[in-house]
Image (cartoon, grey):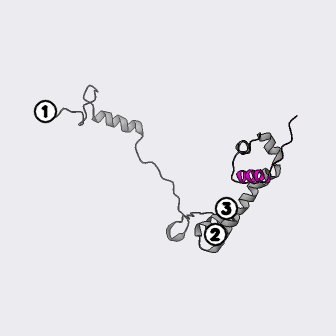
Amino acid sequence: MTAEFIPTPEQRRTARAMAAYGIPQIEIAAVIGISDRTLRKAFREELDRAATEANAKVAEVCFRMATSGKVPAATFFWLKTRAGWREVNRFEHTGGQGGPIQVAALEDSRKPIAEFMAEFLEERSDEQGRLLPSINNAPDPEED
């Protein structure tokens, strides 16, 4: 049977600090020289409270900075995260002179695509219905 592990005050401070900094428990256990199971058993209070205490300290500093008037970024951060503020671009669309937007149906006056294609091919075909070369594909008369 193994002797029960009894942590020293220094080990308790180390475990609390490392847990507050977000170090994984397995790594804290390795630094102290115990298993992670023993760490959770012997340092339960330190592990449970460290992150909350660290967050409270950081929040206190952020609050002081935000309310000092000297760090606008902290003030904006606080208002966005704690007071629910957000940056919004709001656009309102109106018709002429601030009135309602007028909506009208438009008719498509273009030829149907089939008619357009028939005319296009007719203009570019010879008497036998073969397509004539386009200007871009025509041989350069100066190359002869």
Of the residues shown, which amino acid type is indicated by label 1?
Glu
Asked whether the viewer can see residue 8, the reply is yes
Q: Quadrant of residue 134?
A: top left
Q: Earlier in the sequence, mark 3 or mark 2?
A: 2
Q: Do callouts 1 and 3 mark residues in contact (Cβ within 8 Å)?
A: no
Q: Earlier in the sequence, mark 1 or mark 2?
A: 2
Q: Residue at x 81, y 41 (%)?
A: 38
Q: Which mark is residue 13?
A: none
Of the residues shown, which amino acid type is indicated by label 2?
Met
In this rendering, would 20 be left or right of 136?
Answer: right
In this rendering, would 84 be left or right of 2?
Answer: left
Quarter of the image with the N terminus is top right
Q: Which marked residue is nearer to the observer: mark 3 or mark 2?
A: 2
Q: Quadrant of residue 69?
A: bottom right
Q: Which mark is residue 81?
A: 3
The answer to which of 109 and 9 lies nearer the viewer is 9
CA gap between label 1 and label 2 equals: 79 Å
Highlighted magenta segment, given as a residue range: 1-21
